Image: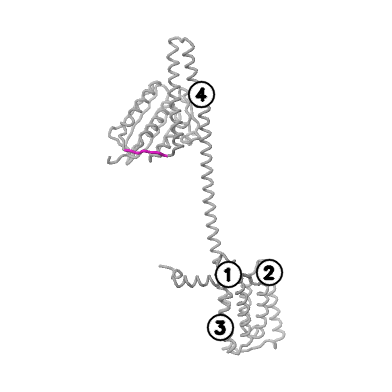
Amino acid sequence: MPKLTSHPVFKKINGFWTKLIGSTSAFPLESRIFHSISISLIILTSFYIPYNFFAGLYIGSFSAFLLWCFFGYQYYHSRFNGHKHNNILFGLAGIGIFSLNYFANSGIDGSTDLIWPVYLLLLLAISPYRQHIVWLVAYLMCFLIVHAVAYYYPFLVKYPFTAGKGQFIDRVTVFPIPVITIYVIIKYIRRSYDNEKRISEEKAATVELRNQQILLQKDQLEQSSAEKTKLMSIISHDMRAPLINIQSYLGLLNENELESHERPALEKDLLNATNNTMQMLTNLLYWSKSQMEGPQVHLVPINLLSVLQNTLEMEKMQASTKDIVLNYRIDDNITAIADVDMLQLVVRNLISNAIKFTPHGGIINIDAQLVLNECKITVSDNGKGIAPDKQQKIFSINTEPGFGTNNEHGVGLGLLLCKEFIERQGGRIGFKSTFGQGSSFFIFIPAAVGV
C-alpha cells in the first residue's frame, strides 16, 4: 500500500513548505526551526488579533499583534535577506510580551502560563548552546518575579473575561500555540536526528568499504611483492644452481677421461639435473605468462585418455629412473570440458611432484572417474607425504619448496600453477596427505555431459 505522503498533492505541499522554510543546504537546523515556528505563529496570531479584539481582549489582541509583527519581521529578514534571527531580541521580546500579557489576561488564572515554557523551548531550539543556561535562568527569574508581583499586588492583574465560559474560550483558543510549537520543534529535532543517523551510517558504510578496498589493495601489493621476491629468488638461485651443476658435469665429461663404470652414474645425474631444470623452467615460463597475459582459457570437449596418454607415458619413463611403478587407469569413455595445454601441465606437475617425493621402488597410481557432473582425476603415491605445518601453504606463493628423495629441488611454483590453471577451467583442486606415508592429489573438472 503506497504511503499517503507519496501522493502528488502531499509532494506539492512539502515542496511549497520547503520553499517557505528554506532548504537544508542553505539554512542550518536552528534557522529552519525558527522559520517553521514563525510561519505557524504568524498564521495563528492572524486569527487571534481580530478574535481577541472583538471579544474585548484588547491587550491580548495587542500582544498578538506585537507577536505577529515581531515574527514576521524576523522571519522575512532571516529567510529572504539572509540575516540570522536575533536570539537576544527574540528572548527579551518574549519576556516583555508575556509579562505584559500575564497582568492583562487574568494572571495565574489566564492562559499565559501555557505559553511561557513553550516559548522558552523555542528559544533554546534556535539559540546556541552557550546561551541556554543564561536564558533558562532569565526566564525562571522573570517567571518568579511576575508571579510574585501579581501575588503581592493583585490589583495590577486585570480580568477581561469572566470565569467559566470566558476562561474556557481563552484556554481553548490559546492551547494550539504551545501544541503546534512543540510539534514543530520535536518533528525537526527527530527528523534532524534521523538524517544525521542515516548520514552517519552511510559514512560508516563508506569508510568500511574504503577500508576493505585498502585491505584488498594491501593484499594485492603484498602478493605482488611476494611474487617479485619469488621470481628474483628463482632467477638468482634456483635456476642458476642446477645450470652450474650441469656445467660442472659437462666439464668433467669433456676434460677428463672417465672410467667406464663412472660414466653411467654421471650421465644419470646429468639427465636428472636436466629434467629437473626443464621442469622448473617450464613452470616458470607458464607462470610468468599467466601473470602477464591474464586468463586465456580455451575450453573444449576432450577425451580424457587421449589427451593425457602421451603425458602419462612420458612421466612413466621418468618414474622408471627411480624404479618407481607408475600405474594409470582411465576409462576411454570419459569426456570432460578443459583447456588441453593447461590440463596436461597440471597433471604433469602433479605426477612430477609424486615422483620427486616417492623413494626408489615406490608406487604412483593415477585414476579418473565421473562424480556427478564432474570428472575427478587422482594422483596418489606412497612417498614422504607433507608435514602438517606445511599443508596450509601448499598452494601459496609463499610455500617453501622441499627436497625430493634424491635431493631434487623445485621452486615452489608447481602446485600454485596447478591451482590457478584448474580454477581458470572452472574446476578445483585438493589433497590428502599423511606425513611419512604418502599423498593423494585430486582435481575436479567439468564433465562433458551428453557430448
Q: Is residue 44 above or below residue 334?
A: below
Q: Which residue is mark 2?
A: 133
User: In front: 149, or 349?
Assistant: 349
User: Mark 3 or mark 4: which comes first in sequence?
Assistant: 3
Mark 4 neighbour density, 10 Å: few (under 14) some (14–19) many (20 or more): some
Between the C-alphas of marks 4 and 1, the distance is: 79 Å
Tags 1 and 3 in contact by the CB under 8 Å rule?
no
For badge 2, the amino acid type reads Ile
Position of 248 with respect to 174 (left or right) is left
* Quarter of the rendering containing residue 293: top left
Amino acid type at circle 4 is Ala
Residue ID for mark 4: 241
Nearer the viewer's eye, disc 2 or disc 3?
3
Give x and y (percent) for residue 81: 61, 71
Residue at horizontal 40 percent and vertical 33 percent from the top: 441
Amino acid type at mark 3: Phe
Quadrant the C terminus occupies: top left
Magenta segment boundaries in residue numbering? 295-300
- Real-space Cα distance between discs 4 and 2? 83 Å
Q: Disc 4 or 1, which lies upstream in sequence?
A: 1
* Residue matched to label 1: 32
* Disc with the residue nearer the chain's start (1 vs 2): 1
Q: Secondary structure at mark 4?
A: helix
Residue to which mark 3 is pinned = 47
